[in-house]
Image (tube, rainbow, N blue to C red):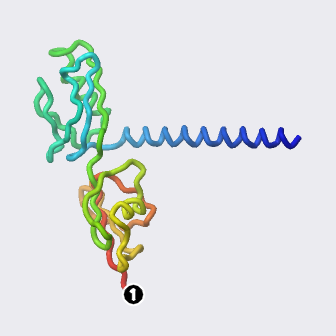
């Protein structure tokens, strides 16, 4: 009887872990489908069956563009990877290829920046799933004068560039500028 209950408990736990892992994978995939490219991102362009048209590593320029064979400058800023795939497919179809299959991968996201009361302010590589606590750890931790209540973020996507107050559990996005103010004792 005890062994059956233990086995049932173990199976329930295993099923729970599998469903959590599956939902986490779906969330990561959904996040990548809405991520907007911008200057500093490094992408890979693959055209299946056409190695001469594939680019292994391309850093987007300050204008958010890159140079592509036969097409010229391609504007990637503000587009998702799927939108850029459709753009390149449309440009290549007809004149160059009958049925092009294009894939875009983000190899490296643009940096986020952290300043103020951290031990090592500067730009750091973005990592998917990054939150403010981890970003502070990457920047060497808080100084002794830092305030954990006076933290602002300017989101790269925000056209107004308006600082927003955030908590330590807030997500960090590529291109964000984080400022940690001094605390008043």
The extreme top residue here reads: 98
- In the rendering, at what x and y percent does residue 159 appear? 24, 56
Q: Residue at x 54, y 40 (%)?
A: 23
Residue for badge 1: 185
146 w.r.t. 2: above or below: below
60 w.r.t. 126: above or below: above
Instruction: Please indicate whether residue 163 sits to the left or right of residue 71 in the image.
Output: right
Q: Residue at x 39, y 63 (%)?
A: 137
Q: Quadrant of residue 116?
A: bottom left
Q: Residue at x 28, y 24 (%)?
A: 102
- In the rendering, at what x and y percent does residue 100 appear? 26, 18
- In the rendering, at what x and y percent does residue 37 appear? 26, 43
Which one is in front, 90 or 128? 128
Q: Residues within 10 Å of mark 1 (few under 14, many from 20)?
A: few
Instruction: Please indicate whether residue 148 sits to the left or right of residue 52 in the image.
Output: right
Give the number of callouts. 1
Element type at mark 1: loop
- In the rendering, at what x and y percent does residue 25 appear? 49, 39
The extreme bottom residue here reads: 185
157 w.r.t. 101: above or below: below
Which one is in front, 17 or 29? 17
């Amino acid at each position: 009887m005890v062994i059956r209950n233990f086995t049932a408990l173990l199976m329930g736990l295993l099923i729970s872990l599998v469903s959590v892992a599956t939902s986490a994978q779906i969330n990561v995939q959904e996040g990548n489908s809405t991520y907007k490219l911008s200057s500093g991102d490094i992408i890979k362009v693959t055209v299946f069956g056409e190695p001469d048209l594939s680019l292994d590593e391309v850093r987007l320029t300050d204008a958010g563009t890159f140079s592509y064979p036969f097409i010229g400058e391609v504007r990637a800023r503000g587009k998702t990877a799927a939108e850029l795939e459709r753009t390149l497919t449309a440009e290549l179809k007809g004149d160059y290829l009958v049925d092009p299959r294009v894939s875009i991968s983000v190899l490296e996201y643009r940096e986020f920046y952290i300043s103020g009361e951290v031990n090592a302010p500067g730009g750091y590589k973005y990592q998917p799933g990054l939150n403010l606590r981890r970003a502070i750890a990457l920047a060497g931790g808080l100084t002794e004068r830092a305030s954990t209540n006076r933290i602002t973020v300017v989101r790269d996507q925000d056209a107004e560039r308006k600082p927003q107050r955030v908590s330590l559990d807030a997500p960090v996005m590529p291109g964000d500028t984080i400022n940690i103010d001094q605390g008043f004792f």
